[in-house]
Image (cartoon, rainbow, N blue to C red):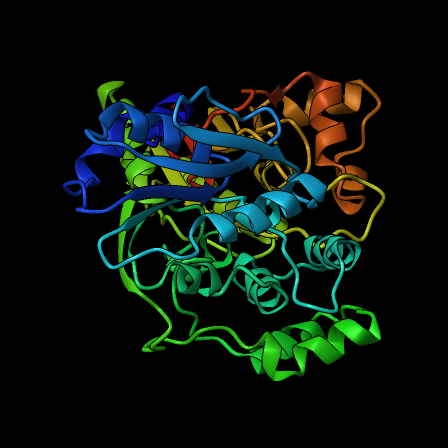
Amino acid sequence: MFDAAIAAAQPARTLARHLPAPPRGRTIVIGAGKASAAMAAALEAAWPGPLQGLVATRYGYAVPCSRIEIVEAAHPVPDDAGLAASRRMLELVSGLSEDDLVICLISGGGSSLLPLPLAGITLDDKQQVNRALLKSGATISEMNCVRRHLSAIKGGRLAAACHPAQVLNLLISDVPGDEAIDVASGPTVPDPTTCADALAIIGRYAIDLPGHVLAALRSDAAETLKPGDPRLPRIRTEWIATPRLALQAAAQVGRDAGYAVHVLGDAIEGEARDVGKVLGGIALAAAQHGEPFAAPCVLLSGGETTVTVRGSGRGGRNVEFLLSLALALRGEAGIHAIAGDTDGVDGQEEIAGAVIGPDTLERAWRAGLNPQDALAANDGHGFFEALGDAVMTGPTLTNVNDFRAIVLTRASRANT
C-alpha cells in the first residue's frame, strides 16, 4: 500500500495532462521542492516546444534534464546553494512579456530550498528560525506563515517578478487541506496572512528570535502580496498530485487483497503521539468489538502531524506516531501498522518511517529497550533502528505528506 501511494504521486504519471498549449512567447520553467526535479523531467518529456529554466531540489533528489537546470540544495535547514538558486530564479523571470509563460513546479520542501531573506536578514538568521520552528511543535501552516514573511521570494513575491507573463503553477501537495500558499510557502500565489499572524505564531510558541528579525517582521517590508494585488500576473494553479490521490491508490491495494478499507482522512494534524493514541483506540475498538469497523480491515490516513522535541532524540513524526500507537495497542494480536513520509525523509532523517506488529513491544523489552522512555525522549528513530523495523526508501521523487496504514488481520477472541 505504501509503494502504491508513492507510485500514484509520481510526476511522470500525472503532470502531462495539466499542460497548456505553448505560448506565443518564451516558456520559462522555475520551481523548488523535493519532487521538482522529477517534475522538470516529466515536463521536458511532454512539452512540444522550446523551454528553459531552473529548478532547486534537495541533495540526492536530482533527475537528469537537458533543457532545465537542476540545482541541489539543503533541506530542511537551508544553505548557500539554495540562496544562490533563489537569486538566479528571480533574475531568470525578470523582463518577461505578456506573451511569455512561466511554469512553476512546486512541491513540499521548497521553503528551505528558496531561502532568500528580506533585506537586513541573513541566511544564518533564516537557519536559526528554521531550526526553532522545527522544534517548536508549530503546524506546517504556522511555520510557513513565519517563513514567507521573512522571505524576499515567497508569499507571492516570485510571481510578482514574473509580471506581466502568464503563470501556471503545477503543484504537488504535502500540506493538510491542499492550500497552495503552504506548499513551499507560496512563492507564486497571493498570501492572505499578515505579519501580525506571523508575530502571533512566534509568541504562541515562545520562539526566541534576534531583535533585528523581530523588527523586520514588524516592518511594512515584510508584508506579502495579497489577493488582488495589481503586481501579480495572470496565475492559474493546478494540483498534479495530492495526499487524497495517494490514499485512493493504497485503498485499492487493500481492497484487492480482500480487506474492507476505511480512509479516516487525508489532512490529520496534531501532535504525533496524540494521533497515535487516538488511532490506537479506534483500532482496538474495531478488533475487540467490531466498532466502528469490523476486522479484517485497513485504516488509512494522511496529513502532517507535529513533534514538539523536548527530549534528546531526533524527532520524526511518523516514528513518534508509531511508537505511541504501539504503546496504545499493548501487543494486541492481529494488528500491524506502517507510517512513513512519502518523500522518504521523516523529519531530518534519511528514513521514511517504520513498521510495528503485535510483537513490537515484547521484542523491544527483550532487547533492553524501554518504549515509554524512547517516546519521552522523542527517540522513535533510535527505537525502530535498534529493532530493525525502520523503513528506508531512498529519494522517492515525490512528496504527498505522511502515509499511515493500520491493518487488522482478524477480530480478537473477545470479539469472536
Question: Image height check: is 85 above or below 357?
Answer: below
For the point 42% across and 52% down, which residue is it? 93
For the point 30% across and 31% down, which residue is it? 43
For the point 78% across and 37% down, which residue is it? 374
Question: Image height check: is 54 above or below 41?
Answer: below
Q: Which quadrant would the N terminus be assigned to in this image?
A: top left
Identify the image quadrant of residue 331: top right
Number of numbered discs on residues: 0
Residue 398: image location, x then y, percent: 43, 32
Q: Which quadrant would the C terminus be assigned to in this image?
A: top left
61 and 160: which is toward the camera: 160
In this rendering, position of residue 224 left or right of residue 243: right
In this rendering, position of residue 29 left or right of residue 146: left
Name of the residue lying farthest toward the left: 21
Residue 184: image location, x then y, percent: 50, 52
In this rendering, position of residue 258 left or right of residue 268: left
Query: Looking at the image, can residue 215 be seen?
Result: yes
Residue 321: image location, x then y, percent: 59, 42
Question: Image height check: is 32 above or below 223?
Answer: above
Query: Looking at the image, can residue 8 be seen?
Result: no
122 and 132: which is toward the camera: 122
Residue 265: image location, x then y, percent: 36, 49
264 and 167: which is toward the camera: 167
